[in-house]
Each structure stands twice: as C-alpha cells, then as structure tokens.
Image (cartoon, rainbow, N blue to C red):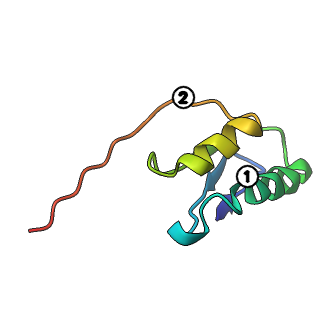
Amino acid sequence: LILTASRWRGVHQLQLWVQPDQQGQHEETLLQWSLATLQDYPRWPVLLTLSSQHHSAIQAAKRVGFQEQQTLLTMRRKI
C-alpha cells in the first residue's frame, strides 16, 4: 500500500498490492484505513491504481465507493 495524500494539489493517490496468497483477506481493510487517513486532508479526488488481475481488490474498491474510470493494459514479454 502506498498512500500519497496531498494538501496542495488536487488529487490523492493510492496504490494497492497484496501478495497472491493473501488476496481476498486484506484489501477492504487497507482501503478503509486509507480513506480514514484521508479524512484529515482536503477533500480531493482519490486516484486508486490496481492490477486488473487483482479481482478481490477491484471488488473491495467498488464496495467502499470507488468507480472504474479507466483501465490500462500493460503487456510484457521476456526476451
């Protein structure tokens, strides 16, 4: 979890990763903690970055009020 709270710019940034064997267990708690922490900051929008393969995090984000705005597909190839 990386939370970048901003007092002077117009957006807060949140990046969330959970180890694969722990997925589905901690996402909602981490998101709720992040949103609670942001209560002490200006009410800017929150930009959340998740892997599109992290389905439990996507569902947790939707449960706490996030809406999908954009999906970025990143492809890799070993050379």
Can you tell which quarter of the image residue 77 is in?
bottom left
Q: Nearer the viewer, residue 65 or 20?
A: 20
Q: Is residue 11 visible?
A: no
Q: Is the residue 18 above or below the residue 39 in the image?
A: below
The answer to which quarter of the image holds residue 34 is bottom right
Of the pair 26 and 76, the residue shown nearer to us: 26
Would you say 17 lies left or right of 74 here?
right
Q: For the residue carrying disc 1, how many other residues have a C-alpha within 10 Å: few (<14), some (14-19), or many (20+)?
A: some
Q: Residue at x 64, y 41 (%)?
A: 59
Residue depicted at x 67% and y 58%: 4
Checking the image for residue 6, the label placed there is 1
Q: Is residue 2 left or right of residue 19?
A: right
Marks 1 and 2, Cα distance to the nearest angstrom?
A: 20 Å
As shown in the figure, which amino acid type bears the numbered disc 2? Gln
Give the image location of residue 50, x and y in percent. 53, 50
Foreground: 9 or 2? 2
Q: State which tag comes first along the sequence, 1 or 2.
A: 1
| x and y percentages locating residue 62 in the rendered image | 68, 36
Relative to 64, is 36 on the left or the right? right
Total numbered labels placed on residues in the image: 2
Q: Secondary structure at mark 1?
A: loop
Residue 46 occupies quadrant? top right
Q: Nearer the viewer, mark 1 or mark 2?
A: 2
Q: Which residue is mark 2?
A: 69
Image quadrant in which the N terminus is located: bottom right
Q: Position of residue 55 (x, y in %)?
A: 54, 47
Does residue 2 appear in the picture of this structure?
Answer: yes
Marking on residue 57: none
Q: Label 1 sits on what residue type?
A: Ser
Are the residues flagged by discs 1 and 2 in contact, CB closer than 8 Å?
A: no
- Residue at the spot x=68%, y=42% of the render? 61
- Quadrant occupied by the C terminus: bottom left
